[in-house]
Amino acid sequence: MRYVIIGAGAVGGAVGGRLAGAGHEVVLVARGAHHEALRDGGLRLRVPEGEFTHRLPVVDGPAGLGALRADDVLVLAVKTQDTEGALDAWAPAPVEGGGTAAERLPLLCAQNGVEGQRMALRRFRHVHGVCVWLPATFVEPGVVSAACAPLTGMLHLGRYPHGTDGILHRIAADLERSRFEAPVVADVTRWQYAKLLTNLGNAVMALSGPDDGGADSTSLRRRVRAEGQAVLDAAGIAYASVEEQRTTRGDKVTAVPLDGVPVGGSSWQSLARATGTIEADYLNGEIVLLGRLHGVPTPLNELLQSLANAFARERRPAGSLPVGELARLADEAVAAAEG
């Protein structure tokens, strides 16, 4: 099989680099300065055991490959807000022997949240969900870090919306030869919604910096998560417990600080890079949507969604809102919702 990594940024670059390092055939898809750096100097993957350069085929869209191969696996690793554009480009791509990518090829949605795979299922017949537990960082064009050991990450795989199939077991075997654990599960969304609850704190980090262990930060993150849990419970959506996640991961994916690599989640990285967009609509916004559908107030997630979008739109610096000020705004939002 050949893996076509659509969005070879932090997560996509880490997955593609590890697969390539284990001898699997990989094509990277990127744009702009990152595309140029990958094309000219290869993918530089920084991991706890060192830095590895992988010189791989790089394209900026399906036209660069011609007809896709029947054994291609498409890995969608763009941020959710960029999903529609990627689907527009890749769904109609022709495949050798006839048909299109949307009709014939498996698409793995290696993304935060749950919306990307719903978008994909409107176009692609064979959509697979991935619960991505893979701390990775886009360091600079051409350079990605994945700073965990002894495994690089844990990737639960399943058909979307439910079930498994043979191709997933083949993909899982390739990933497990590439320093990942890749359980194939029939209920992948249960793991994705659990990860979503964790990702609700991404906006707190993006706005106010990493958790400093202080009372304001700890309390706010706990309240935001509790709001999310109340919404999922009201919607009847199952999610893996914190204990189940902790037991499953154990000490297999442990952070190892790397020199010269900034520490920050995906939303923090979006603000730090001043991309102009952020995925809050599909993290906190998912809880807001479900809350409105099921009659559960979500003032904290609404606040974080609004602030994160404003920071991205205005290109305000990551971590520049003091956490005490954010906590004050959160209290006001809750009071307004209750009053």
Image (cartoon, rainbow, N blue to C red):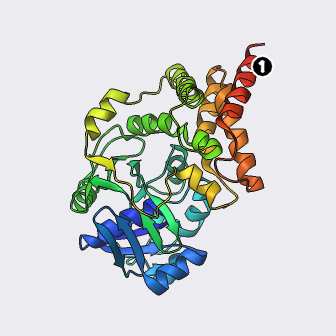
Q: Is residue 187 left or right of residue 119?
A: left
Asked if residue 45 lies left or right of residue 280, the reply is: left
In the depicted view, which residue is nearer to us: 291 or 246? 246
Position of residue 182 relative to residue 306, above or below, is below
The residue sitting at 57% across, 64% down in the picture is 86
Query: Is 173 left or right of 300, judged from the image as shown?
Result: left
Q: Position of residue 200 (x, y in %)?
A: 55, 37
On the image, the x and y values in percent for residue 253 come to 30, 48
Of residues 335 and 16, which is closer to you in this image? 335
Can you give x and y, in whole percent of width and height, for residue 267 in the image?
58, 50
| 326 relative to 266, above or below | above
Q: Name the residue located 54 percent from the left edge and 43 percent from the top edge.
A: 210
Q: Residue furthest top?
A: 339
Q: Position of residue 18 (x, y in %)?
A: 31, 66
Report the quarter where the N terminus lies.
bottom left
- Residue 258 quadrant: bottom left
In depth, the one of 301 and 257 nearer the eye is 257
Q: Is residue 94 visible?
A: yes
Regarding residue 72, the answer to whether it shows in the image is no
Residue at point 34%, 53% (across, down): 256
- Quarter of the figure that contains the C terminus: top right
> What's the amino acid at mark 1?
Ala
Instruction: List the residue tagged with mark 1.
Output: 336
